[in-house]
Amino acid sequence: MSTNPNEKHIHQGRNIKRFREILGIKQEAIAMELGDDWTQKKVLQLEAKETIEPALLQQMAAILKIPVAAIENMDDEGAINIISSTFNADNSSVGFSVHTEINTAEKWLETLEENKKLYERLLQSEREKVEMLEKLIREK
């Protein structure tokens, strides 16, 4: 492990988890978007990985609707700064703060709508599974 204090420590899995949680997306919804061979547990394991394969990183960025560079480049200090600047807006920049709050509210509403659509797709998928199981039970 490097002891250089200026070196950034980037954990891509943790960054994915941060963005997913900020956007209010469940691991199950991510698994569903990634495909049939994905589960909540597999997403949990992905979030524990320090480095993620480029193709999978591209998929995750697309699902989260963020640039790949955000996942690749945000270190722990950057995450703290983002959180800090979000919750501790400087009163001397009221114009910036108001503009940021409006954009944040709009983004929040967009994200809520996207989450609703993801949830509806997940629910529909579960209904289809139940129907298939019921059909199999009736046939036996």
Image (spheres, rainbow, N blue to C red):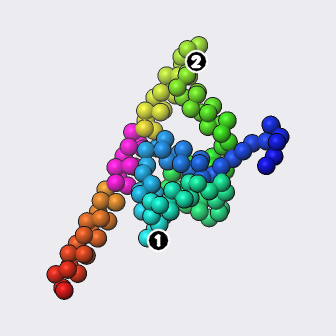
Q: Is residue 49 above or below residue 14?
A: below
Seen at 30% across and 65% down, the residue is 126
The picture places residue 66, in percent across and down from the top left corner, at: 56, 48
Q: Amino acid at mark 1?
A: Asp
- Disc ID at residue 37: 1
Q: Is residue 67 visible?
A: no
Residue 124 included in the magenta stretch of the image: no
The residue that appears at 34% across and 49% down in the rendered structure is 116
Dot 1 falls on a residue whose secondary structure is loop
Residue 110 belongs to the span the image colors magenta:
yes
Instruction: Give the quadrant of residue 36.
Output: bottom left
Horizontal and vertical percent position of residue 117: 35, 53
Q: CA distance from mark 1 to mark 2?
A: 46 Å
Q: Residue at 54% x, 44% y: name it.
A: 18
In the rendered image of this protein, does residue 70 appear above or below residue 6? below
Numbered badge on residue 107: none
Residue type highlighted by circle 2? Asp
Q: Classify residue 42 as left or right of residue 78.
A: left
Q: Which residues are magenta?
A: 109-119
User: Could you tell me residue 120's position as x and y percent?
Assistant: 31, 56
Q: Which residue is mark 2?
A: 90
The foreground one among 3 and 54 is 3
Of the numbered discs 1 and 2, the one sitting upstream in the chain is 1
Which residue occupies the extreme top position in the image? Answer: 92
Q: Which picture quadrant has residue 76?
A: top right
